Image (tube, rainbow, N blue to C red):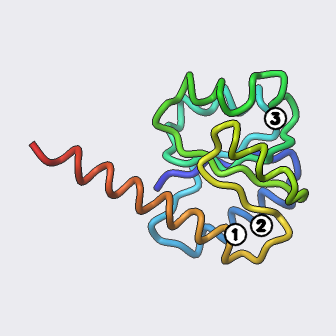
Amino acid sequence: MRVLLADDNRKVRFALATLLQRRPEIAVVGEATDVTQLLALLPSVNPDLLLIDWQLPGLAEAGSVPALRERFPELMIVALSGRPELGHEALALGADDFVSKIDPPESLLGAIAACVARLEEKQATADVP
């Protein structure tokens, strides 16, 4: 699974990348610090999964998850925030999952595992004639 990280906090991106490097089925293919970088990277790195800070600079102005879905319909999106109360909003706007940054790492790994399973299922059905 190819993962793109989008968070304006360098320490958060580093922690996410470090956590994901332990998983052989996951490759971090890029990092963005704002929506401008994110939109520039998405077509070139072609990720399967976007881990995005729900309060990423420029996200609201860019149209949030619905706009990303319109441009990249196959992209799976897991929203992240230090404010757990924003989870309902993220899911209502189309994120595949929401993980609070204050949750243990296992919560994020569980959300990613669910995305890996969906990707594998999609690939398996695409291979069937």
Q: Could you tell me how far apart the alpha carbons at marks 2 and 1 are, in whole angstroms? A: 5 Å
Q: Is residue 107 above or below residue 68?
A: below
Residue pointed to by mark 1:
18
**Residue 126 coordinates in the image, percent (x, y):** 23, 44
Q: Could you tell me how far apart the alpha carbons at marks 1 and 3 are, in whole angstroms? A: 20 Å
Q: Residues within 10 Å of mark 3 (few under 14, many from 20)?
A: some
Residue pointed to by mark 3:
34
Instruction: Give the left or right position of residue 108, taking residue 13 as reference.
Output: left
**Disc 1 vs disc 3: Cβ atoms closer than 8 Å?**
no
Residue at 51% over, 67% down: 113
Q: Is residue 79 above or below residue 66?
A: below
Give the secondary structure at mark 1.
helix
**Residue 123 coordinates in the image, percent (x, y):** 29, 50
Give the secondary structure at mark 2.
helix
- Give, as a three-letter code, the residue at label 2: Ala
Residue pointed to by mark 2:
15
Work out which quarter of the rendered image holds the C terminus and state it. Answer: top left
Residues 90 and 1: in front is: 90
Give the secondary structure at mark 3.
loop
**Disc 2 vs disc 1: Cβ atoms closer than 8 Å?**
yes
Q: Could you tell me how far apart the alpha carbons at marks 2 and 3 are, in whole angstroms? A: 18 Å
- Give, as a three-letter code, the residue at label 1: Thr
**Residue 38 coordinates in the image, percent (x, y):** 70, 33
